[in-house]
Image: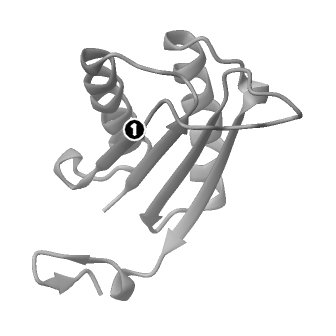
Amino acid sequence: MPYLKITTNLALEGAQKVALATELSHLIAQALDKPAHYVMTEIADAKTLFFAGNDQPAAYLECKSIGLTALHATTLAASLCRHLTSVLPLTADRIYIEFSNSSAQFWGWNRTTFG
């Protein structure tokens, strides 16, 4: 049920995107104590992003999950930024992250909801 979408103006290679999606899926699963087979990660690269008055490398992340807490958000903000800045030419001050806690009754999967 956790979902992480990364939108960036960086152009990534196919293998790089798969590796990044895999790494971040494991990071999210561990941080939220959720089964890895429920985590979905999307990477939208080579997008037009204009942030802080310029088009330097930047990223916008959306992280949604059932049961997401403020503590999860704080922990994930640090770990996601740390990971992204270690594998991509990004700085943490060029990354925005939107966290959303979803109600189980409004998250569907396999012909039903989690509620």
Q: Please name whichever residue, 56 or 64, is drawn nearer the observer in this view of the structure.
A: 56
Q: Residue at x 64, y 39 (%)?
A: 77
Residue ranking furthest to the right: 53
Q: Is residue 62 above or below residue 16?
A: below
Residue 93 place in picture, x, y as percent: 79, 27
Q: How many marks?
A: 1
Residue 114 place in picture, x, y as percent: 26, 80
Residue ranking furthest to the left: 110
Residue 96 place in picture, x, y as percent: 70, 42
Residue 76 place in picture, x, y as percent: 57, 41
Q: Please name whichever residue, 106 or 9, is drawn nearer the observer in this view of the structure.
A: 9
Q: Residue at x 60, y 58 (%)?
A: 99
Q: Please name whichever residue, 65 or 90, is drawn nearer the observer in this view of the structure.
A: 90
Disc 1 marks which amino acid?
Ile
Q: Residue at x 16, y 86 (%)?
A: 112
Q: Report the side of 57 relative to 51 (left or right).
A: left
Q: Quadrant of the C terminus?
A: bottom left
SS type, badge 1: strand
Task: Name the colour scheme.
Answer: one colour
Q: Is residue 111 above or below residue 68?
A: below
Say which quarter of the image contains residue 75: top right
Residue ranking furthest to the front: 48
Say which quarter of the image contains residue 108: bottom left
Q: Quadrant of the N terminus?
A: bottom left
Q: Report the side of 56 relative to 39 (left or right).
A: right
Instruction: Assess disc 1: are there few (<14), some (14-19) or many (≥20) residues with their C-alpha within 10 Å of its C-alpha.
Output: some
Q: Which residue is mark 1?
A: 43
